[in-house]
Image: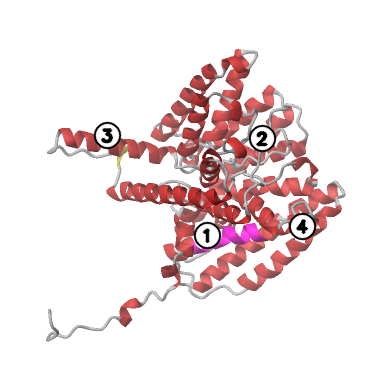
Amino acid sequence: MNYAVIRYILGLVILFEGAFLSLPCIVAMIYREARGIPFFAVMLLCFFVGFLLSHKKPKNMQYYAKEGFAAVALSWILLSFFGCLPFVFNGDIPSFTNAMFEMISGFTTTGASILSDVEVLAKCSLFWRSFSHWIGGMGVLVFILAILPMGGGQNLHLMKAESPGPSVGKLVPKVRQTAKILYGIYCFMTLIEIVLLMFGGLPLFDSMLLSFGSAGTGGFSILNSGLADYSPYIQYTVTVFMILFGVNFNVYYFILIRKFKDAWKFEELKYYLFVIAAAVICITYNIRDLFPTLESSFRHAFFQVGSIITTTGYSSVDFNVWPEFSKVILVMLMFIGACAGSTGGGIKVSRVILMLKTVKKEMYFYIHPRSIRKIKFNQHVVEHEVIRSINIFLITYMMILAFSTLLIALDGFDLITDFTAVVATLNNIGPGLELVGPTSNFGMFSDFSKVVLMFDMLAGRLELFPMLVLISPITWRDTKVFKKIPKYRKDSPGV
């Protein structure tokens, strides 16, 4: 284990968080808020701690998957720790556990909140809360890779640990250049949404915060009513951008270099759009009697489907009172999630497609035992290692889901509340059903349950294994275990 590299990476992450904290300080100055002083204090603290950890660059910058996974997991925990301190110090969220929950929910783009009244927060707190979505959407380490040359030639391990999807590749030969392209597309699309929302009559502040939430597919609202009080134009605009940010960013890269046919060849994109269209049609028909016009039924169905499948978590209506058929569809969308390589969470459309193709292949094998069929995805043969990793991911996912539901059941709430709370946090969605529905919050859970749900949010955002690697004892043991194994002599019994 190269501890020096981990220390150095953590230092860089904390330094960058200090730089990010300057933005809510500026917001506090603009609105003349005294509650912005703790943001300035924590910013200085981040600069101090970050400098201590990163001022001396390690001589050996080589690191591998183990160091990459551990560094990413620790980075997100430290990001949330320092990021929650201003809320505690300025009194907006006095409880450290609640503040940590809120910040982890922000950085992991979950959007699950413990707050019952967000409108009492200071403007600087509202900004930092929503901006955390934007930071976490693409990943802070991907941002660092885009800005700084890390060296060591193993930067793909960081991207693999932080980027969602069954596999992560490079758009161009250099990882740093790939990170620049990704963040360039991310910033450009965010800016377009801000402009379009301002065109619809929203102030710059509101437009920025809603765009941060939909770009990072986070879902923190700045009003207690969510997006219910906004105009249909605003709701449609946010819906479209939520869906756009749920698309694999490789598609946008091919569009950028004018390879439109290659962009449309992405099989995952076609299935993603098909699932959205089918869900919207079914729900619109199912809830048509709950709204005065067919257009309003379609708009709310379109909004909630886009919000749930991209794991954004915004709400334009209380879908907790919708018919069971519609709620079941939304729960299914929670599991499916967005595309790999997007800012969305969930299992990912590509994994679902490959799992279904695996089932189809097995069924065909039972009928024709001597046949040889290969699974293809995006017109390429899928390696067995990819299928194996998906199977392991699904097994691990189900174990965490079941065990987390069991643990928070100790609080004594109903099964639907407990189950959808874990589903909403593990898939980075935000709202669930019943007591954690779109008009409720997670504040009623005990501190123990909140810790479990915090782990689920981090595990879901980091694709499970970085968090498991971090807490596994074998990660931190001396890897040179073979030195302890005695050598066998030729005359040893059984040899």
Q: State the mark number for residue 360.
A: 3
Front one among 10 and 255: 10
Circle 2 Cα neighbour tier, 10 Å, few/some/many (<14 / 14–19 / ≥20): some
Query: In the image, which disc is placed on residue 411?
Result: none
- Give the distance between the C-alpha atoms of the residues marked 1 and 3, in whole angstroms: 36 Å
Q: Quadrant of the N terminus?
A: bottom left
Of pointers 1 and 3, the one earlier in the residue sequence: 1
Instruction: Tell me how far mark 2 sits from mark 4, CA to CA.
Output: 29 Å
Give residue 439's mark: 2
Between label 2 and label 1, give the one nearer the viewer. 2
Which region is colored magenta? 70-81
Question: Would you name the residue on which mark 4 appears?
Answer: 39
Work out which quarter of the rendered image holds the C terminus and state it.
bottom left
Which residue sits furthest top?
293
What amino acid type should be assigned to the residue bearing mark 2? Thr
Q: Earlier in the sequence, mark 1 or mark 4?
A: 4
Residue at disc 2, secondary structure: loop
